[in-house]
Image (tube, rainbow, N blue to C red):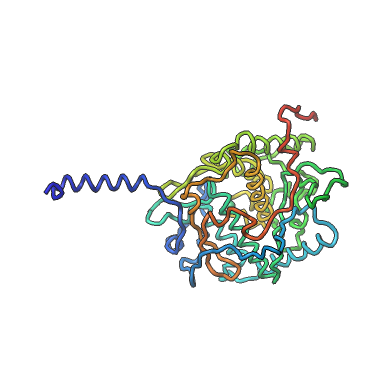
């Protein structure tokens, strides 16, 4: 009889609501998310980048490629260690791939415009959490940052492979973090890359080629200007425009700053899962607005610094991949995620199913929509590729008590 009392029923209802709120769930992107896509914004700047509201055709569950154990993994190499014929062949292929990608019509989800457009939708709160009116989604500023971008680069690379009709094509990486060129005789003896990656990769700086983007800062056009990682991402503010970088530093000072920053963010401040991977972010949580409000150490510092440093399209989340250099840059961020995992016992990925089961949609090389989960993108090797080893000693073993070089 007691259950018939309206007050008891109301109490039970409220209790159930409370319990269901306690239960967490991962972010999931669905057909419905696309249907509900709307005008987004970042720091008050509007972004109109929704993909078509209706996803044509099926959505397939992503499955990692079936690998032949006797075949060596494909290797993403460090751009600055390519030389001779290999460099010439790679540059030609890369530029051809982007030429073909740019030539696809916007109706094709593999076209370059649609490739950078989908990043914009995932970066500007254009997608709304299912069942919500106002909770927007961003794959930045939080713990989905690394796996989502690995998947994004993966599918982008697959599309280039398909356009080039070459399944061995790799998006090589820009290891801007390596400040140290070792002696030539030491280089490459174990297949590793020991040349400094401080300078903008030249194959992305030819104005006659499809890998070029005119909208960059002057710094990016100066082949002698070393990358500066030391901008503090917590000061990132779109409405103030790109930050200025000091013009008067010596190379030795830039190198000191970069090594110190990498060491601090990966080994001192970044010594726990949340500190490095970023804030936990689940269904029901508001999108974290602003880098300072939950980005992990790599995202917050060296990553943001490089976006500002290259500037132009790269400066804003909504337009960053309109500059093709975004991809070798992000390939390096992904490599550095693996480096971080190897640097200490406390360096572990999140184990929560809310992270592992985070679910997203991206088109593949056949223009078919793939549903993938974070857990599918934890290992480059399982996806069929690996990274050429590159020197990280210059910042891993950096002596933080070493004096800042004099001018
Ligand atoms: Cu991004």
- Front-most of residues 105 and 262: 262
Direction left: furthest residue: 1
Image quadrant occupied by the C terminus: top right
At 74% across and 63% down in the image, what residue appears?
A: 209
At 73% across and 42% down in the image, what residue appears?
A: 392
**Camera sees residue 236:** no
**Camera sees residue 155:** yes
- Front-most of residues 133 and 276: 276
Query: Is 9 placed above or below 119 here?
Result: above
- Front-most of residues 91 and 17: 17
- Report x, y in % for residue 358: 48, 54
- Report x, y in % for residue 16: 28, 48
Query: Is 322 placed above or below 345 here?
Result: below
- Report x, y in % for residue 71: 71, 64
Q: Quadrant of residue 84?
A: bottom right
Count how many numbered circles sit on residues in the image: 0
On the rendered structure, is 110 left or right of 180? left
- Report x, y in % for residue 354: 46, 49
């Amino acid at each position: 009889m007691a259950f018939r009392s309206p007050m008891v029923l109301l109490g039970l209802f409220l209790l159930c609501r409370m319990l269901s709120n306690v239960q967490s769930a991962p972010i999931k992107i669905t057909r419905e998310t696309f249907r509900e896509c709307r005008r987004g914004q970042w720091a008050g700047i509007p972004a109109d980048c929704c993909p078509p509201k209706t996803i044509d055709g099926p959505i397939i569950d992503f499955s990692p490629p079936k690998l032949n154990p006797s075949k060596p993994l494909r290797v993403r190499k460090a751009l600055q260690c390519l030389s001779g014929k290999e460099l010439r062949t790679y540059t030609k292929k890369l530029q051809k791939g982007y030429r073909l990608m740019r030539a696809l019509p916007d109706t094709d989800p593999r076209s370059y415009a649609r490739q950078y457009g989908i990043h914009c939708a995932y970066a500007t709160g254009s997608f709304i959490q299912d069942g919500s009116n106002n909770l927007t989604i961003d794959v930045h500023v939080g713990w989905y940052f690394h796996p989502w971008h690995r998947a994004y680069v993966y599918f982008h690379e697959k599309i280039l492979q398909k356009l080039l009709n070459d399944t061995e094509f790799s998006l090589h990486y820009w290891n801007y973090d390596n400040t140290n060129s070792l002696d030539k005789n030491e280089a490459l003896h174990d297949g590793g890359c020991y040349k400094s990656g401080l300078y903008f990769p030249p194959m992305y700086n030819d104005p006659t080629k499809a890998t070029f983007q005119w909208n960059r800062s002057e710094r990016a056009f100066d082949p002698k200007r070393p990358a500066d990682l030391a901008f503090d991402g917590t000061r990132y503010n779109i409405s103030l425009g790109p930050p200025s970088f000091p013009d008067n530093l010596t190379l030795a000072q830039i190198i000191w700053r970069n090594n110190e920053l990498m060491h601090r963010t990966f080994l001192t401040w970044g010594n726990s899962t949340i500190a490095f991977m970023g804030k936990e972010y689940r269904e029901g949580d508001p999108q974290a607005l602003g880098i300072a409000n939950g980005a992990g150490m790599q995202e917050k510092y060296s990553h943001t610094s490089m976006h500002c440093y290259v500037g132009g399209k790269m400066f804003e989340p909504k337009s960053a991949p309109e500059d093709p250099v975004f991809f070798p840059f992000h390939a390096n961020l992904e490599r550095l995620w693996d480096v971080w995992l190897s640097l200490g016992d406390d360096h572990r990925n999140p184990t929560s199913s809310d992270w592992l089961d985070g679910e997203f949609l991206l088109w593949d090389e056949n223009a078919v929509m793939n549903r993938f989960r974070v857990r599918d993108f934890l290992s480059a090797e399982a996806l069929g590729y690996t990274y050429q080893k590159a020197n990280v000693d210059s910042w891993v073993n950096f002596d933080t008590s070493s004096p800042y070089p004099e001018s």
